Amino acid sequence: MKKLALIFAVSLAATPGWTHLPVDVVFVAVQFPDANIPTVDGNLVEWDVIPDAYWINHEQLTETVRGVGTAWDATDLALRAIVGWNPNTNKLYVMEDRFDDAIWVVTGWEPMEMIFDADHSGGMFNVWADVEDQDQKDLLHGAHAQNYGFNQGGPGLNHWGKAQWITEPPYGQFANTQTADEGGEGFFRAEYMLTPFDNLNWNGIDQSTIGSLVEGNITGFHFTIIDDDDLEIGGYEGYWTLSGATDSYFQGDLLSDFLLAPIDPDIDWASQATAEATAVEEIGWGRLKSTFAE
């Protein structure tokens, strides 16, 4: 991973004055070759060739609502996430592999909330206390950064705004699988495909501007994992943020920085096809736990 370390160093040196969080941290979005773009079906086998240098796990998250901070308990919630991209599809791809002692993602309120600020512009994209006109709020909401999550009370990707059309192909897509019924202990796994928008107008694509993902650029991206194990009691058991800032759900300056990396020649992309053609061993708790300890 010497090349990956060099990418980190060059990107840090070349981009001074960032306000995004965590301070002086740049995550790397792996570039998928055209022949290896993941199929959004909830089966994570296509991601298994990507080394852990690209992984984000629960130990990189900070709980900001309940005061837990970085006191992680992997027997309660554990995570492996990867962000990827491809310049020809001009799409961001996200993988979520979550262990939860009580899964309430689809029918409860435990989404991975994602914010995508493709052109790294920062600024407010939600919550305007000084704007009273609702039509104006609807136009501002998600215009230059989009906030995604699950529809509460049912399956489906949701955009926190009126532009629900961006959650469906060809602009957005997701699929998920899980190893236990809702409320049970097990794994929730999901894949997401997102489109970069420099200007999103909820009225339609003809009034919106799609941005461009360019190799070597820094894009703004962030996610929060919500943990709420007892729906009868309600409230967050954990609000686990990548940036460490609760207000990242409306303030683009509090997102995280992701480098749109070049194709990594050290990744054995040929083995991806082999893995897809064979039965995939289920990632058990012991294997997931051991990867975090390495």
Image (cartoon, rainbow, N blue to C red):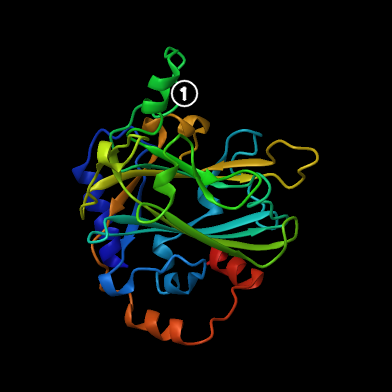
Indicate the secondary structure of the residue bearing disc 1.
loop
Q: Is residue 39 above or below residue 249?
A: below
Residue 22 makes an appearance in the image: no
Which residue is at a point 53% across and 85% down the rendered structure image? Answer: 279
Figure quadrant of the N terminus: bottom left
Q: Position of residue 15 (x, y in %)?
A: 22, 41
Q: Residues within 10 Å of mark 1 (few under 14, many from 20)?
A: few
Q: Position of residue 193 (x, y in %)?
A: 40, 56
Please give left or right for residue 276 compared with residue 19 in the image. right
Q: Is residue 192 above or below residue 210?
A: below
Which residue is at a point 33% across and 73% down the rendered structure image? Answer: 36
Which residue is at a point 29% across and 35% down the rendered structure image? Answer: 18
Q: Is residue 3 above or below residue 103?
A: below
| Front-lying residue, 226 or 245 | 226
The amino acid on which the numbered mark 1 sits, given as a three-letter code, is Val
Please give left or right for residue 240 compared with residue 3 in the image. right
Residue 53 makes an appearance in the image: yes
| Front-lying residue, 177 or 286 | 177
Q: Which residue is mark 1?
A: 127
